[in-house]
Amino acid sequence: MATHALSIAAPAAATPHLTLTAVAVPGNDTASCWTADPRAVKLLASCAALPPVMLEHRSRFGNAVDRWTAFAGYRVEALEAIRMEIGDRLLQAYHQQGPDAYEPFRDWCEQPNASAAVAAVLVSSTEH
């Protein structure tokens, strides 16, 4: 866990062709994705310019072994912290305001996690 604030400079000069947009949420054109947060935009631009390391993960339960890959590093952790901060705010709003505030929280639950957002940005940056 980070003990001090992160300072990330957006690599606009290094990647002039890169235009970041919020990661699309399938089937939901009205919801604002957490990737539209200005802090997330800067971090995703940084990841597009210099991709974070991808690690292979393994978990074992009995005879079942699950394997998956995910991006790792401080930028991915910061993106996940932004995602969770927004999710916590939406959940608190739901608890305080009732069922009327559930829809934004449900939409947030369907949005990509930090590793998926980095992967989407890398795919979109290589398509140009």
Image (cartoon, grey):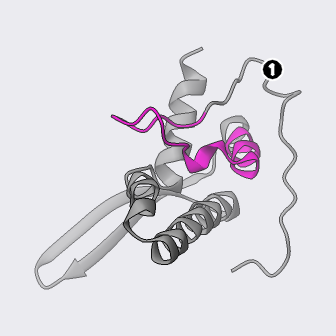
| Residue furthest to the bottom | 62
Looking at the picture, how far across and down is residue 86, in whole percent?
Answer: 60, 62
Label 1: how many Cα within 10 Å (few below 14, some 14–19, many 20+): few
| Residue 57 vertical placement versus 63 (above, below) | above
Q: Quadrant of residue 121?
A: top right
Along the line of sight, the residue nearer the viewer: 92 or 68: 92
Quarter the C terminus occupies: top right
Quarter the N terminus occupies: bottom right
Residue at x 75%, y 51% (from the top left corner): 39
Task: Name the side, left or right, on which 61 lies relative to 28.
Answer: left
Residue type highlighted by circle 1:
Pro
Along the line of sight, the residue nearer the viewer: 124 or 50: 124
| Residue furthest to the left | 63
Along the line of sight, the residue nearer the viewer: 77 or 105: 105
Residue at x 54%, y 75% (from the top left corner): 92
Looking at the picture, how far across and down is residue 73, in whole percent?
Answer: 64, 62
Task: Name the side, left or right, on which 125 lies relative to 61.
Answer: right
Tell me the SS state at disc 1. loop
| Residue furthest to the top | 128
Q: Quadrant of residue 28?
A: top left
Residue at x 39%, y 55% (from the top left corner): 103
Residue at x 10%, y 80% (from the top left corner): 63
Looking at the picture, how far across and down is residue 67, in whole percent?
Answer: 29, 63
Q: Quadrant of residue 80?
A: bottom right
Task: Name the side, left or right, on which 122 lies relative to 1.
Answer: left
**How many marks can you see?**
1
Looking at the picture, how far across and down is residue 43, in whole percent?
Answer: 72, 48
Magenta range is: 22-46
Q: Which residue is mark 1?
A: 16
Q: Is residue 96 magenta?
A: no
